[in-house]
Amino acid sequence: MNNEELTFESYMAAETAKVEAALARILPAGWDVPEELRAAMGYSLMAGGKRLRPLLVLAAAEALRGSKEAALPVACAIEMVHTYSLIHDDLPAMDNDDYRRGKLTNHKVYGEALAILAGDALLTHAFHAAAQAYRIHGVPAEQVLNIMDDLAVYAGACGMVGGQAADMLGEQGLTRLEDLQYIHTHKTSDLIVFSLLAGGRIAGANEKQLQALESFGYAIGLAFQIQDDILDVTGDEQKLGKPTNSDEKQQKVTYPFFIGLEASEARVRELTLEGKQVLLAADFPRPERLLQLADFLMRRDH
Ligand code: GRG
């Protein structure tokens, strides 16, 4: 059976397995890495998670009939960056969380210093991983350079790190929905947009196609984060083994805090629809998996 004939569930299972296998090979056994550092990196990288960002890289490449094999190194790179951000976010200096994905957080197992280094190593190794799109799969060097440039920008000071800083600095007095939206855009949507652009670039997307992927990404990225805010209020984090304190939940300034739960749910549906319409208007040869992923994110319960 070829890929297009698989049900969405089988497609997701097959793509996730491909990503997991590639991630498991990311630090070859022969490389001279201190054993504890290797273990700390692998502990969080291989701890499950939805693998959403890699799946978006692969689906964007597929939407433009690009090679998913060639997209795989970049899919791994973005998951490494995402994993580093989670490790650092859980540290005592930031969110001070004991559990992530139902397991003890990295610093709870390896100590703070090694957790910081594991995050640093995942971030820097991500650029090496992305380079394999050129070295092994022959993606043109210019495309890979653009992907690496995007990665630095979308994950860095004007992207995810900037969003995290704004979140931290505004923690005491966030009073406007626009400010929350700024945080969501950078902290969450930027890596989603990067993933879509990277898949598009691997497939040789033109400027118009990249613009459509970007608009789609910002729409589903915000929908994804509002859904996260909704799940925060409705308490599904407990399913992941993360104990939540009900006072903490009520105090959190999230989307439902500003516009209420029902309006937030409606916004998730609207944004998903908007994103899908942009993609359909762009006339990609195989947009089906991206459209299905958008619906999947809207319906998710964790
Ligand atoms: C420390 C530089 C730095 C950044 C941290 C990712 C992040 C930024 C903070 C984590 C907290 C949070 C709610 C971020 C918003 C993005 C988000 C919803 C992350 C969780 O992503 P999922 O749901 O996680 O894809 P899994 O576990 O499925 O990979």
Image (spheres, rainbow, N blue to C red):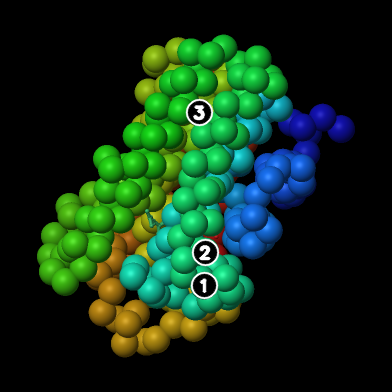
| Quarter the N terminus occupies | top right
**Left of 190 or right of it: where is 143?**
right
| Quarter the C terminus occupies | bottom right
Residue 193: percent from left, percent from top: 42, 36
Q: Which of disc 1 and disc 3 is earlier in sequence?
A: 1
- Residue 245 circle label: none
Q: Kindly check if marks 2 and 3 are in contact, taking CB atoms under 8 A apart as contact.
A: no
Name the residue beneath numbered marker 3.
198
Name the residue beneath numbered marker 2.
114
Task: Say whether residue 32 is visible.
Answer: yes
Distance (Cα) linking label 2 and label 3: 30 Å
Distance (Cα) linking label 3 and label 1: 34 Å
Give the amino acid at mark 3. Answer: Ala
- Alpha-carbon neighbours of circle 3 within 10 Å: few (<14), some, or many (≥20)? many
- The outermost residue toward the right is 1
Above or below, comparing residue 112 to residue 289 in the picture: below
Q: Kindly check if marks 3 and 1 are in contact, taking CB atoms under 8 A apart as contact.
A: no
Residue 216: percent from left, percent from top: 42, 34
Quadrant for ligand 1?
bottom left
Going 60% across and 58% down the picture, which residue do you hit? 37
- Residue 111 circle label: 1
**Left of 7 or right of it: where is 285?**
left
Going 27% across and 48% down the picture, which residue do you hit? 162
Above or below, comparing residue 233 to residue 68 in the picture: below
**Left of 134 or right of it: where is 261?**
left
